[in-house]
Image (cartoon, helix red, strand yellow):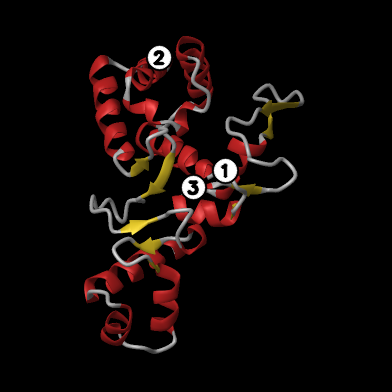
Amino acid sequence: MDNPNYSFAEAAIYLKIPQPTLRAWFKGRTYPRASGKGEGYFKPLLKLPDKNFLLLSFNNLVESYVLRSLRVEHDVKIKAVRSALDYAQREFKITRLLLRRDLLTTAGELFLERYGTLVNLTKSCQIELREMFKEHLKRIVWNDEQWPVRLYPFIDHDAKKEIAIDPLISFGKPVIARKSISTSAIISRIDAGETIAFVADDYGLKPKEVHLAMRYEKRLAA
């Protein structure tokens, strides 16, 4: 699960995260100081599996997905996330909390509470944050050792789990979950002129699943 496999370009598309943002999370970046005097440095928040290869692992995808869920819904403050993660690690000795199923336990509650306090969220906003966060975490499947093994990305905020990213299927590319057929293979045949009915019959899919693959690939291209 920690094998280098995804380029920054691929990961940015799959997760709908701007590539410069994703790179900053893993590689850091410089930025001009507000005072106009010199540059500051944003330290990486997440760690690549091998510093010699600019490739993300499936575990990195999950970490980025979790971080994005906070950022998109609540304009996450990265400094506060860094501080909250450090606090949770000191309290529970859990490294890479954004990757672990511990996010669904007391450790996760502590992380969110600490984060909410650091950015001055009201109690009602903290409750809203927890509920939103739980919905995003339901898209992750963990094994008995509490490590992620599958991710179901949202499709236009559709709650159904019909598209999956699984490192053991189709080289970790997005697939129709029911049949493990890659969405890119489906769309390439449609683009080549084959009909939806023919592709669905050939793969043993329902026509709506072919439409779903088309929607997903269109979303990726957007």
Element under label 3? loop
Classify 10 Å Cα crowding around label 1: few (below 14), some (14-19), many (20 and above): some
**Whether residue 171 is situated above or below residue 97 in the rendered picture:** below
Figure quadrant of the C terminus: bottom left
First in sequence: mark 1 or mark 3? 1
Q: Position of residue 156 (x, y in %)?
A: 30, 55
Say left or right for 39 vs 34: right
Give the mark nearest the N terminus, 2 or 1. Answer: 1
Q: Residue at 47% across / 64% down in the picture?
A: 170
Which numbered mark, 2 or 1, is in the foreground of this view? 1
Task: List the residue tagged with mark 3.
Answer: 17
Q: Secondary structure at mark 2?
A: helix
Residue at which label 1 appears: 2
Q: Quadrant of residue 200?
A: bottom left
Disc 1 to disc 3, C-alpha distance: 20 Å
> Number of callouts in the render?
3
- The residue at the point 38 percent across, 18 percent down is 107
Q: Residue at x 39, y 89 (%)?
A: 193
Q: Nearer the viewer, residue 128 or 91?
A: 91
Left or right? Give the position of 101 relative to 197.
right
* Circle 3 Cα neighbour tier, 10 Å, few/some/many (<14 / 14–19 / ≥20): some
Q: Amino acid at mark 3?
A: Ile
Sequence-earlier tag: 2 or 3: 3
Residue on which disc 2 sits: 114
Image coordinates of residue 78 in percent, x first then y, are 51, 27
- Amino acid type at circle 1 is Asp
Give the distance between the C-alpha atoms of the residues marked 2 and 3, in whole angstroms: 25 Å
The answer to whether the residues at label 1 and label 3 have Cβ atoms under 8 Å apart is: no
Asked if the residue at tag 1 contacts the one at tag 2, i.e. Cβ–Cβ closer than 8 Å, the answer is: no
User: Height in image: 79 above or below 65?
Assistant: above
Splitting the image into 4 quarters, where does residue 203 fall?
bottom left
